[in-house]
Amino acid sequence: MVPVVLLHGFPFDGSMWRDQAAFLRSPEGGGHAVFTPDLPGFGPEPQETAFSPEDATIEAFAGSVHRLIASIGGRAVVGGFSMGGYILLALLRQFPGDVAAAIFLDTRPDADSAEARANRLASIEDVSKNGSAAFVESMLPRLLGPSAQPAAKDRTRKIMQRQSVPAIIAAQRAMSIRRDQGDLLSQIPVPVQIIVGAQDAITPPSVALAMQSRIPHAMLVQIAGAGHMSPIEQPAAVNTALRSFLALVKA
């Protein structure tokens, strides 16, 4: 079986996939080799590979994923959550041979709108001056659905709180200047699954449905009772969706 690589969103790290990694590695989940890397700059420990704000692009993040995939056999099923989905699309454009199948979770293919870009730039300025605490608390309510359990909220907050200010700034800049990848969707030749929380306020089901309509062979799963953080809010449902897809593509 080809390995499975799961790319975290912003501002998180590979630990957001704890439940999915444990399940997919188990016999019940298919016994897959699963990799959940901390993207450059993210994670509980400072990384020498972190990008400076000037060098941070979604393509640069994709390059780091390409190097990981090269080190584990040169081909993988790749799943990308939110910002990880942006990186997966860049990987498909730059290094299509790396991707045996693609899983997009709570993400979108288009670039930032002018308003979203302005908000990112404002958040960069705020975090630079004041640190990330207020930024985390302001972001948290939008990430979770109205039925999110306290444990999911607490875990989401803790992962966000441990990300460094330089990583947050670099990723915000990279996302603010990312290209629109809509033209790529109809050209994706590999199996595709799209997963979205039914209560996602950031990348709602309407975005996932529009994305599916542009990838003729894509499978779509809506996760009931989940907002944007579907892998943390409803891990069992996301696990089941992933297992079904991986079995179908024989990964």
Image (cartoon, rainbow, N blue to C red):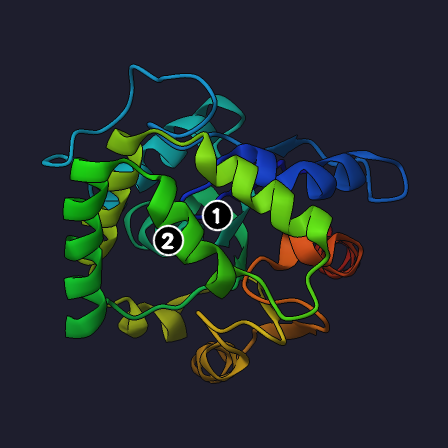
Residue 128 in the image: x percent, y percent?
18, 37
Q: Is residue 197 visible?
A: yes
**CB atoms of marks 1 and 2 within 8 Å:** yes
User: Residue, x 49% and y 43% (percent of image)?
Assistant: 7
Q: Secondary structure at mark 1?
A: strand
Residue 168 in the image: x percent, y percent?
30, 39
User: Residue, x 56% and y 76% (percent of image)?
Assistant: 217
Residues packed near mark 2 inside 10 Å, few (<14), some (14 to 19) or many (20 plus):
many
Above-or-below relation of 120 to 182 = above
User: Residue, x 73% and y 58% (percent of image)?
Assistant: 234
Name the amino acid type tagged 1. Val
Q: Secondary structure at mark 2?
A: helix
Name the amino acid type tagged 2. Leu
Above-or-below relation of 210 to 123 = below
Pick the front one: 139 or 64: 139
User: Residue, x 49% and y 35% (percent of image)?
Assistant: 13
Q: Which mark is residue 92?
A: 2
Pick the front one: 144 or 111: 144
